[in-house]
Image (cartoon, helix red, strand yellow):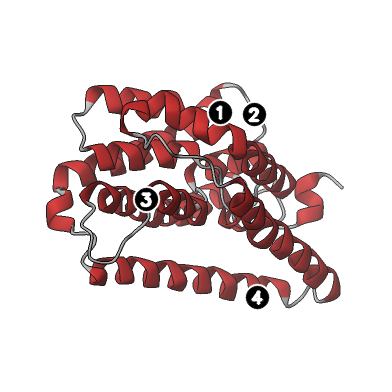
Amino acid sequence: VPLLALLFLAIFPLDPGVAIGLALCAAIPGGTMSNVFTFLGRGHVALSIALTGVTTVACLVTTPIVLGLLIAQHMPVEFTMPAGQVAIEIALILLLPLTLGMAFLAALPDLAPRVSKVSIRGSLFIILLIVIGAMGSGRVDLEKFGLFNLGVVLLFLFFRATASWLIPWLARVRRPDNTAINIEVTVRNGNLGLLIKASLFPALAGVADPVGDNVLFTVLIYGGAALLVGFGQIYLHRYLNRDIPLSYADVTGR
C-alpha cells in the first residue's frame, strides 16, 4: 500500500494537504468495521481481527516511518506520533468492543446478528455526522478541494481494493482469508486517521489552515468511500464464499 501511495504521489501533482492525506490513508491500519464486514462477507473473522490488532499496534512504529518516507517534505518538524492516544484508541475502539461483542455473542447468539446491523448503521450515522460537521464548519470546501483531487483519492481507493483482492487470489490464498485481507486493506481506521490529522494540523479558532483542511477532507472522503466499497465487498465475497456457512466457528475451522 505505501508503494502504491508513493506511485500516486510521484505521478499526480497533488496539493500538499491532499498528498499528506493520501499518505495518511496509506499509513493507518484497518479498523474494527473491517471485522464486521469480513463476518458478513463469510470471511475468516479470526484472521481479520488478528490483522486489525497487529497492524494497529504496529502503526505506533510504522506510521511515522511511512509518513516520513512518503511526505517528509510536508511533515511538520515537531510532529511526533501520539502513542498514548493511539494506545487508548486500541483499548477503547478495538479491544473493548471485541471483548463485549464476544461476551454478547456467547450470551445471546440469536440476537447478535441484529445488534451487529444496528452497530453498523450507528457507526455510519456517526461518520455522516462528522462529514456534515466538517462541511458545515467551513474548514473544508469540495469546490476548492477540486474534482481532480477527488478523482485521485477515489482512484487510489479503487487500485487499493483491487490489488488487495487480486494479489492473494494469484497467490492461491484461501477464499475466506482473501476476504479478510481484501476488506482489511480497503476499510481503514478513520478514527485514527482523524486523530493523527489533529496531531499534525490542530485546528485553531480563527486561523486559516488550507493544508490541514485538505488533509481532513482527504481522510473523510477516503473513509466514506471505503465504507461504500466495503459494503460492495460484502456482497461480492458472500457470493464467492456462498458455500461457506456464515458462522465464526465454521469459518475458523473450529
Residue on which the image places disc 2: 173
Residue at point 24%, 72% (across, down): 136
C-alpha gap between disc 2 and disc 4: 31 Å
72 is higher (above) or lower (below) than 103: above
C-alpha gap between disc 2 and disc 1: 6 Å
24 is higher (above) or lower (below) than 5: below
Q: In the structure shown, which secondary structural element does the residue marked by tag 3 occupy?
A: helix
In x, y percent, where is residue 15? Answer: 20, 38
Q: In the structure shown, which secondary structural element does the residue marked by tag 4 occupy?
A: helix
Residue at point 32%, 71% (across, down): 133
C-alpha gap between disc 3 and disc 4: 28 Å
C-alpha gap between disc 2 and disc 3: 30 Å
Specify few, some or many for label 1: CA neighbours under 10 Å numbering under 14, 14-19, or 20 or more: some
C-alpha gap between disc 1 and disc 4: 32 Å
Amino acid type, callout 3: Val
Q: Earlier in the sequence, mark 3 or mark 4?
A: 4
Residue on which the image places disc 1: 169
Q: Earlier in the sequence, mark 2 or mark 3?
A: 2
Residue on which the image places disc 3: 219
Q: State left or right for residue 137 relative to residue 196.
A: left
Q: Earlier in the sequence, mark 2 or mark 4?
A: 4
The residue furthest front is: 78
Q: Nearer the viewer, residue 44 or 55?
A: 55
C-alpha gap between disc 3 and disc 1: 28 Å
Amino acid type, callout 1: Trp
Q: Give the label on residue 115, or none.
A: 4
Is residue 147 visible in the rendered image? The answer is yes
- Frontmost of labels 2 and 4 is 4
Amino acid type, callout 4: Val
